[in-house]
């Protein structure tokens, strides 16, 4: 038995198994429990260490060879697996309430397994190929069989596919830079290709046009899942590049590029969000600013920035999940997410509306909510480097906050004597309610996740020191 | 010398197929040209890889074309030729755009050849041609079949260059899976699209 079999091949097999049940709630439960079990196993079972169970001795090997290449999951990667599968479980449990379990759970499980595989494959630049496979699997999730594929899905497919060749070429060039570190031209070429590859994969300005389109034309929950998992894994993959190549890590230009890209995403995403008239697009722009924050975190001093980067992942996932589920509740009842049809919907969907507002406010970094601790750390770190940059960040957040206030205004703007209704199901209410509680708990007591967060940077040998 | 002549002839073939793909309105022609394109790519890759591994590219490409063809043959609508007469979406515009891409690519061939050790000018010219024309194709349509063909063309160009620097079996296998996956996704999108959108003449 080896770790890649448990955390990559087994979930791939499970993705087929969870396809079998005809009832959505069984699929969601099976998928959620499987992901939770994988997360628990990553937390509890040591890799590469002999384990005594009664008379038996068991040792899980860290690597497996496939076609001459190694797939490695080291003990240092285990906290990351715990986090990824734990958060995936959260999405799978909510899939039935969003009316998407039979599509999201099997495909989501396979996508998660492939993306975990992308973090484990060696040489690590092959990860681009596994990310591309996950992107291909995401298409049926985003575009249901009975719906004409929209421009967003097509652009998503094109942009993500174009990212792969850049990453593969840059990986090859980076090997050349390692061999001859003095070759400046080669370093510039490889860094340019790497930048272009990640610009496509992370949908960095101006390549994020597919995100608002997709949030408008696809199921909010499916888009939310993709907007959570793809950027998160790509960012971890990108952090692997920084960790591996010291010239890249120590280059002031690289940090400056990361900072500029992050700021551009937060400022443009935030400002665009302020003018949106569609709740789905609003979530898309908030997701864009989330990626911007992650890039900003990586541009800070390593001992400070990496902690902020990991602090950001969990609240972003929880916030997106609540937001996407709440929007799905509205779309499941045939509601359009445009502002003009959303007037006064707070009285028909009180819990979903509360979920939307609080998730949005958490994405703006409002105190007491989950986004605040990470945003505060990043903003403070940025202000230490440049006050001007901190002001730009504030501008982006102000735009996002304006979007939240406009959403709130629209949702509560009902005519007088409109009766209160309760159109959500008890499952939807329970899940959104629990999510909102977690948003507050994480905002008030971020230290509760310290045992997990403190071990995450260990996956990066140099950055994590 | 003979190899070089055949290689330059292959570049000519790739030029013909990529321009043909831009101009073709009938999906049968498009898929036939795509299959021919993979034959050219096979020759280019063959210069750097053993024949058995290079054949993987050919077989994968043909399988991708076959998957798209089988899906398309099951759909009813006839090609739409209405937009053919209109400029700038018509053939003349496409030919001019293809010439522009060609003019952009040709001067950069020697520079790109310097970056990749051991690669010849014909391979670089062929690869850049595929990438450039594929990107042009992607920019001209939102029709699922054309998008898939455009992406497969771009990837074929990339794989031709990458074959000169990477000979790993795992990479060859993963790239084959990506190509086939792309064809399957294209087929899925084709089936998902309502019938009236399936004509090859739709220009996006």
Image (cartoon, coloured by chain):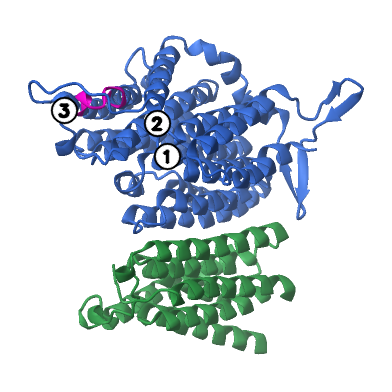
Q: Is residue A150 left or right of residue B163?
A: left
Q: Is residue A346 magenta?
A: yes
* Residue A147 position within the rendered picture, expressed as x and y whole percent measured from the top left: 35, 56
Question: What is the crowding at mark 3: few (fewer than 14 residues within 10 Å), some, or many (at least 20)?
Answer: many
Magenta region's main secondary structure?
helix
Chain holding disc 2: A
Residue in view at x 31 percent, y 49 percent: A217
* Disc with the residue nearer the chain's start (3 vs 2): 2
Residue in view at x 41 percent, y 83 percent: B20
Question: What is the crowding at mark 2: few (fewer than 14 residues within 10 Å), some, or many (at least 20)?
Answer: many
State which quadrant residue A453 falls in.
Answer: top right
* Residue B126 position within the rendered picture, expressed as x and y whole percent measured from the top left: 52, 76
Return the mark for residue A227: 1
Q: Is residue A211 shown to the viewer in this render?
A: yes
Residue in view at x 31 percent, y 22 percent: A351
Query: In the image as oriented, which residue stretches furthest toward the right?
Result: A55
Q: Colour of chain B?
A: green
Which chain is depicted blue? A
The residue that mark 3 highlights is A344
Query: In the image as oriented, which residue stretches furthest toward the left?
Result: A416
Give the residues drawn in magenta, as a range: A345-353
* Disc with the residue nearer the chain's start (1 vs 3): 1
Q: CA distance from mark 2 to mark 1?
A: 8 Å
Question: Do marks 3 and 2 share a subunit?
Answer: yes
Classify mark 1: helix, strand or loop: helix
Return the mark for residue A320: 2
Classify mark 3: helix, strand or loop: loop
Q: Nearer the viewer, residue B156 or A27?
A: A27
């Amino acid at each position: 038995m080896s770790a890649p079999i448990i955390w990559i091949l087994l979930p791939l097999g499970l993705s087929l198994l969870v396809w079998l049940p005809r009832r959505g709630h069984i699929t969601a439960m099976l998928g959620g429990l499987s992901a939770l079990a994988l997360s628990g196993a990553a937390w509890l079972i040591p890799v590469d260490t002999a384990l005594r169970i009664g008379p038996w001795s068991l040792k899980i090997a860290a690597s497996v060879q496939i076609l001459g290449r190694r797939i490695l999951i080291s003990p240092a990667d285990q906290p990351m697996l715990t986090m990824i599968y734990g958060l995936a479980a959260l999405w799978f449990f909510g899939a039935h309430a969003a009316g998407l379990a039979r599509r999201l759970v099997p495909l989501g499980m396979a996508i998660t397994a492939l993306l975990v595989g992308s973090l484990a494959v060696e040489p690590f630049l092959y990860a681009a190929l596994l990310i591309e496979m996950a992107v291909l699997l995401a298409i049926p999730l985003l575009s249901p069989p009975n719906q004409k594929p929209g421009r967003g899905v097509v652009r998503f497919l094109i942009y993500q596919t174009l990212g792969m060749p850049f990453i593969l070429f840059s990986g090859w060039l980076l090997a050349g830079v390692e061999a001859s570190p003095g070759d400046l031209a080669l370093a510039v070429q490889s860094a340019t290709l790497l930048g272009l590859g990640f610009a496509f994969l992370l949908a960095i300005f101006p390549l994020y046009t597919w995100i608002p389109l997709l949030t408008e034309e696809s199921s909010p929950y499916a888009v939310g899942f993709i907007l959570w998992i793809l950027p998160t894994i790509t960012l971890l993959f990108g952090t692997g590049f920084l960790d591996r190549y010291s010239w890249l890590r120590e280059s002031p230009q690289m940090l400056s590029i990361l900072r500029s890209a992050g700021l551009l995403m937060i400022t443009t995403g935030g400002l665009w969000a302020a003018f949106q008239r569609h709740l789905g697009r609003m979530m898309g722009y908030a997701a864009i600013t989330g990626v911007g924050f992650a890039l900003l975190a990586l541009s800070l001093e390593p001992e400070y920035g990496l902690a902020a980067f990991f602090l950001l992942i969990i609240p972003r996932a929880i916030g997106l999940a609540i937001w996407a589920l709440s929007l799905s509740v509205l779309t499941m009842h045939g509601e359009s997410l445009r502002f003009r049809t959303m007037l006064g919907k707070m009285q028909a969907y009180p819990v979903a509306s509360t979920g939307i507002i609080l998730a949005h406010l958490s994405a703006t970094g409002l105190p007491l909510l989950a986004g605040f601790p990470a945003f505060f750390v990043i903003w403070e770190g940025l202000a230490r480097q440049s006050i001007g940059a901190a002001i730009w960040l504030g501008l982006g957040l102000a735009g996002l906050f304006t979007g939240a206030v406009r959403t709130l205004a629209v949702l509560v703007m009902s005519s007088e004597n409109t009766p209160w209704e309760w159109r959500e199901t008890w499952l939807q209410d329970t899940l959104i309610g629990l999510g909102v509680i977690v948003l507050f708990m994480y905002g008030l007591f971020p230290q509760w996740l310290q045992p997990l967060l403190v071990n995450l940077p260990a996956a990066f040998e140099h950055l994590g020191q | 010398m003979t190899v070089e002549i055949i290689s330059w002839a292959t570049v000519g073939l790739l030029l013909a197929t990529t321009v043909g793909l831009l101009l073709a309105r009938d999906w049968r022609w498009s898929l036939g040209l795509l299959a021919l394109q993979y034959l050219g790519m096979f020759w280019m890759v063959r210069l750097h890889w053993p024949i058995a591994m290079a054949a993987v590219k050919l077989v994968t490409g043909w399988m991708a074309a076959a998957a798209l063809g089988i899906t398309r043959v099951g759909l009813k609508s006839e090609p739409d030729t209405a937009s053919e007469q209109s400029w700038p979406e018509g053939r003349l515009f496409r030919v001019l755009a293809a010439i522009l891409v060609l003019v952009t690519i040709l001067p950069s061939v020697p520079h790109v050849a310097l970056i990749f050790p051991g690669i010849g000018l014909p391979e670089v010219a062929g690869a850049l041609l595929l990438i450039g024309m594929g990107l042009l194709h992607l920019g001209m349509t939102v029709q699922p079949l054309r998008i898939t063909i455009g992406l497969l063309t771009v990837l074929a160009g990339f794989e031709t260059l990458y074959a000169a620097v990477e000979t790993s079996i795992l990479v060859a296998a993963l790239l084959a899976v990506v190509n086939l996956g792309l064809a399957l996704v294209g087929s899925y999108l084709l089936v998902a699209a309502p019938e009236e959108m399936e004509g090859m003449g739709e220009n996006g």
